[in-house]
Amino acid sequence: MSLDKAKTIINDIKNGNVAPIYFLMGEEAFYIDGISNYIEQTLLNEEEKGFNQMVLYGRDVTIDEVVSNAKRYPMMAERQVVIVKEAQDLSRTIENLVSYAENPQPTTVLVFCYKYKKLDARKKLSKVLKKHNAVLFESKKMYDDKVPGWIIQVLNGKGYSITPKAAQMLTEFLGNDLSKINNELDKLQLIIKPEQQITPQLVEQNIGISKDFNNFELQNAIGAKNVKKAFAIVQYFAQNPKNHPLVMTVALLYSFFSKLLKYHAISNKAEAPKMLGVNPYFIKDYQTAARNYSMKEVSGIIASIREIDLKGKGVGAANMTPADLYKELLTSIFK
């Protein structure tokens, strides 16, 4: 997991195990920024930074210029730090770093922030970095279903706690953008004490996410066959399409019913949380839905959701409004 690897890298630096090159790459910018910011803020003291810390940007420099700066000797300090931000802009010539990576300057810490891309493992640079004591870190994008657990883990590490439902609400509203989520968590930590738990009410009051009109509540209403509540929620969604895009609702319901189909097939229900990859807190929702929808019905619902997804993207339903599509979706589920 990227979080654990990032913690290990930072702990190594704290313990004085500093590598000559940090090549931070991948789709998730949050950990890349976290590690590079830690190096930028802590590796040198304020007096040393003036002469010995340099921040470059990939769009403004060449690999040769980066290497030239990296080969400089520090002034009145043990080491110098060279950080290359937006290094993905150097992707066409990044292999030119090979010769420096084979023999890096021991008094330089060179950091590459290579966001949204990764090195080709078949090419020489990747192999050289692995061989010559560099830190090669890939920050992978987190799957949506892993985000609530990440939120809980991050808050626990800071001495805070959050209810599973509140974590799910944040995930639904913010997706898997860890930087956005972390910013919202920082806001919540400013207004509560560590012994307080972050609840759906706190999330609603301070982040603006409705605890009653969201996809999580829609999923529960559908699972419980609460027709009135489900239609009230989708009516609210249709009136606020920017905050509640149909594509997001369809994706979440597809995920829910796909897992419900698996739940039906699990013989030992005690293993359901692990096999479905969901928090045990939410298993009761699958138990309820399984009583209300047979395996055959679930299969039909999944087919209907796929059809609505296509229509939502304009295939065979050019004149249908979000309200029409939501109504058709619920009608097909509750039929």
Image (tube, grey):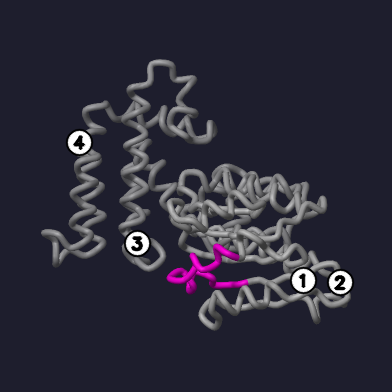
Give the residue pinned by disc 1.
Answer: 80
Image position of 157 (left or right of 14):
left
Q: Residues within 10 Å of mark 4 (few under 14, many from 20)?
A: few
Q: Earlier in the sequence, mark 4 or mark 2?
A: 2
Please say whether residue 91 is one of the residues in the magenta stretch: yes
Instruction: Report x, y in % for residue 153.
Output: 64, 44
Please say whether residue 113 is one of the residues in the magenta stretch: no
Would you say the residues marked 3 and 1 are in contact, meaning their CB atoms lie under 8 Å apart?
Answer: no
Label 4, label 1: how many angstroms apart (C-alpha)? 63 Å
Image position of 80 (left or right of 294):
right
Give the residue pinned by disc 2.
Answer: 77
Give the residue pinned by disc 3.
Answer: 245
Residue range highlighted in magenta: 84-99
* Nearest the eye: 28 or 162: 28
Circle nearer the viewer, 3 or 2: 2
What's the residue type where badge 1 is placed? Gln
Please tell me the numbered disc located at residue 300. 4
